[in-house]
Image (spheres, rainbow, N blue to C red):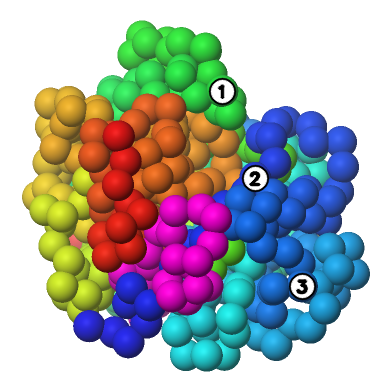
Amino acid sequence: LYSYSVLHHPRSPAFDYPLLVALVDLDEGIRLVSNLIEVAASQVRIGMPVEATFAPTAADRAVPVFRPATDAS
Amino acid sequence: MRPFARNAAIAGVGATEFSRAAGRSELQLATEAIRSALNDGGLTAADVDGLVSYTIDPVEETELVRSIGFQEIGFSSRIPYGGGGSMGTLLHGAAAVASGAADVVVAYRAVRARSGASRFGEAKTAPSPSSQHSGTTAMQWAMPYGVLTPASWMSLNATRYMHRFGVTNEDFGRAVVQLRQYAMNNPAAWGFQRPMTLADHQNSRWIAEPSIRMFDCCQETDGSVALVITSTERARDLESVPVLIAAAAGAGLFEQEIASDHYRPDLSVMDGSVALARRLFGDFSISRDDIDVAMIYDAFSPILLMQLEALGFCGLGQAKDFIADGNFALDGKLPCNPNGGLIGEGYIHGLNLVLEAVRQLRGTAVNQVSNARTALVTASRTGAILTCDEESGRAERS
């Protein structure tokens, strides 16, 4: 996890708030803007290992989002 | 030394009132500000042959020519990068008049950022792939995650900055307190006679936690600012005291985005401003010690601290102490944004910072820096250094 922010305002009807957004540096060397799921805002720490999963978005598509890594390897 | 340095000058400045509901179009606002600036310099519309604005300004040159009555425009240009490009108007204006491409250039920006069709701070709901908005195709990689607003874009950089250097939101608050104290005295400011304590700041609601509270944000503002730029030689014969453009530069780096700047290697440092400072203080024989007053683009308070460091006025991570020690005050090491800044005065997308720099160098500011001779104006990736005209004999003031 390179950085994060907990968004409160203004609110778009497309999202639930507070909204956890993140910058994730992939091992492959790419940085992504994404969301963090399955973690409380108070538990988020820069540098924590995260892993990708997928969440539904508009038009029946999916986008990569991140949750705390279950396997530290 | 660049050939245009000190060969171009700001010969007039003008503005409308700053409000939350102007009740008239951007075109009319721009027209009023430009007429005011021309009057300030003792010029008429017929003297103008150049126009400069931002790519995202809604006022078209053709409409402006018709509305004001310009007779023959020979040079026009627009600056990309949103507010980060705002000081590019000075670079373009100076380059145009010093090269002979134009004799008198008007730089303008008109916004209805509060009452217009799209409030500046509100969520953008569709990517804007054109450079005409304050974002690029990279926005399509942020919007699916709800990263829709300028505050949300910049907050990701700010969190990383806070993490690396142990900076808190209260540290940002101390900068805001200084800006709001300045704004208290400025009748043109949103913050005029509107006190705010550090406790008020800390009690204001979160916009983007842990970096940006409501009082860390600039004001969405309606209004317009205009500048008249001509050769130093001609400016000396005009009515107002000329303010020389002693330096002007811009820097756009590989993979640097605009407000959604998420792909540079180290987001805890605004390295576009590092590059800008290298040009401003490397190419023009002016040092940081020469700066009497600094106008630094404070759309959100975290980027004020980050730019202060990137510009080299203190070490990385030291802006919080620099500000806590009172150095932004009139008697500090670097009086900063004494109009109240974009946070305290209003947000004409950065151009009102130039207005204040000119007032400071003319000696007519409400919060006047004693004997200000050299002013820095910067907006992330563009900037300029303005000076009094020491050779004209007209710069003497009480």
Labels 1, 2: one chain: yes
- Report the side of B304 relative to B13 (left or right): left
Residue at which label 1 appears: B187
Residue at which label 2 appears: B15
Can you give x and y, in whole percent of width and height, for residue B324 in the image?
17, 26
Can you give x and y, in whole percent of width and height, for residue B93 in the image?
52, 75
Q: Amino acid at mark 2?
A: Ala
Q: Secondary structure at mark 2?
A: strand
Circles 1 and 3 in contact, beta carbons < 8 Å: no
Q: Secondary structure at mark 1?
A: loop
Please check the rendered image and state whether residue B244 is part of the magenta-colored stretch, yes or no.
yes
Q: Quadrant of residue B8?
A: bottom left
The magenta stretch spans which residues?
B230-258
Q: Residues within 10 Å of mark 3 (few under 14, many from 20)?
A: few
The residue shown at (77%, 49%) is B32
- Report the side of B177 relative to B86 (left or right): left
- Report the side of B149 relative to B277 (left or right): right
